[in-house]
Image (cartoon, rainbow, N blue to C red):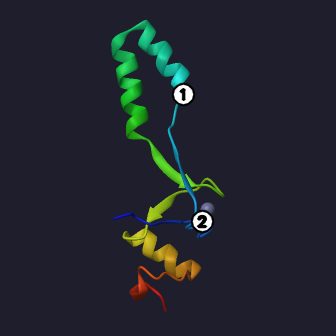
Amino acid sequence: MRTEYICESCGSRSARERITKGSLQIELVLWALLLLPGLLYGFWRMATRTYVCRHCKRNVSPLTTAKGKLALKQFGCKSASTPDLVG
Ligand SMILES: [Zn+2]
């Protein structure tokens, strides 16, 4: 089942994009220097990978979470998949 997300800032539900913190070039340099720094940096990048709103680059929350439901009420979005949250 696909999880729906909502932007906590602008209420957009249509678009989100995945961002990865840090830089792939830095990671490759660290890998080239020594094994451990590259491993740690790569792990950090994977751990901090997250989704942001495509419009305003702010946090998005799944509609199933408290934050997501709050944002849904706040922006008054209508949803066919979650009728219990509307109104
Ligand atoms: Zn947004």
Tell me the SS state at disc 1: loop
Residue 16 lies in quadrant: bottom right
Q: Is residue 31 left or right of residue 17?
A: left
Residue 6, above or below 48:
below
The answer as to whether callout 2 falls within 8 Å of ligand 1 is: yes
Label 2: element kind: loop
Residue at the location (60% across, 65% down)? Answer: 9
Residue most toward the bottom?
87
Residue shown at the point (52%, 31%) measured from the top left: 22
Few, some or many residues within 10 Å of mark 1 (<14, 14–19, 20+)? few
Which of the two marks, 2 or 1, is nearer to us in this view? 1
Residue for point 42% across, 79% down: 81
Q: Amino acid at mark 1?
A: Ser
Identify the residue at image location x=41%, y=81%.
Answer: 82
Whole-percent x, y for residue 29 in the image: 50, 13
Question: Residue 23, labelled with which disc?
Answer: 1
Labels 2 and 1: the sequence-earlier one = 2
Q: Residues within 10 Å of mark 2 (few under 14, many from 20)?
A: some
* Residue type at the position of mark 2: Ser
Q: Picture coordinates of residue 12 (x, y %)?
A: 59, 67
Quadrant location of ligand 1? Answer: bottom right
Return the residue at label 2.
9
Q: Residue furthest top?
A: 33
Q: Residue furthest right?
A: 55
Q: Is 70 in front, or is 2?
A: 2
Q: Which disc, if any, is residue 56?
A: none
Q: Position of residue 6 (x, y in %)?
A: 51, 67
Marks 2,1: beta carbons within 8 A: no
Structural distance between the alpha carbons of marks 2 and 1: 26 Å
